Amino acid sequence: MPQARKEAVRQFACLFLNDKVPNHKEILAIKGVGPWTLDYLKMRGERNPDVYLEGDLIVRKMAQLYPVEPAQAAPWRSYLTLQLWQLSNQQKEV
């Protein structure tokens, strides 16, 4: 693992010291953490059902192949993201 990534993970872990739950602004302040990472954390870590990872390369590719309207999937856009990833995996298997 690159040193910069190790440092980002260390800083992320430090945000949770003393049972403190960091806010999104604090997470984004970590070098190496951007909007995609924060959205992924919201979707997986916070179990937010309404996160569409529009910046994700696979999501963008699959959304071009299978035209989707993310707004129509609200408040369940996380499931749309997961389905687009699954479609990509299925295409690789064929």
Image (spheres, rainbow, N blue to C red):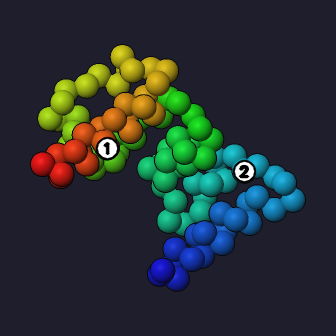
- In front here: 24 or 60? 60
Quarter of the figure with residue 28: bottom right
Q: Residue furthest bottom?
A: 3
Most foreground residue, 82 or 8: 82
Q: Label 1 crowding class (10 Å Cα cut-off): few <14, some 14-19, many 20+?
A: some
Instruction: Please give left or right for residue 36 compared with residue 23 in the image.
Output: left
Q: Residue 90's x, y, as percent?
A: 22, 45
Vertical placement of residue 80 versus 53, above or below: above
Instruction: Give the x, y percent position of residue 25.
Output: 63, 48
The answer to whether residue 93 is left or right of residue 54 is: left
Residue 60 visible to an observer of this rendering: no
Furthest residue toward top: 72
Dot 2 crowding, Cα within 10 Å, few <14, some 14–19, many 20+: some
Secondary structure, mark 1, is helix
Q: Position of residue 29 (x, y in %)?
A: 60, 58
Mark 2 residue element: loop
What residue is rendered at 50% in x and 65% in y?
32
- Judged from this view, the residue extending furthest toward the front is 94
Q: Is residue 35 left or right of residue 28?
A: left
- Callout 1 amino acid: Trp
The residue under the point 53% across, 30% down is: 49
User: Pointer 2: what residue?
Assistant: 22
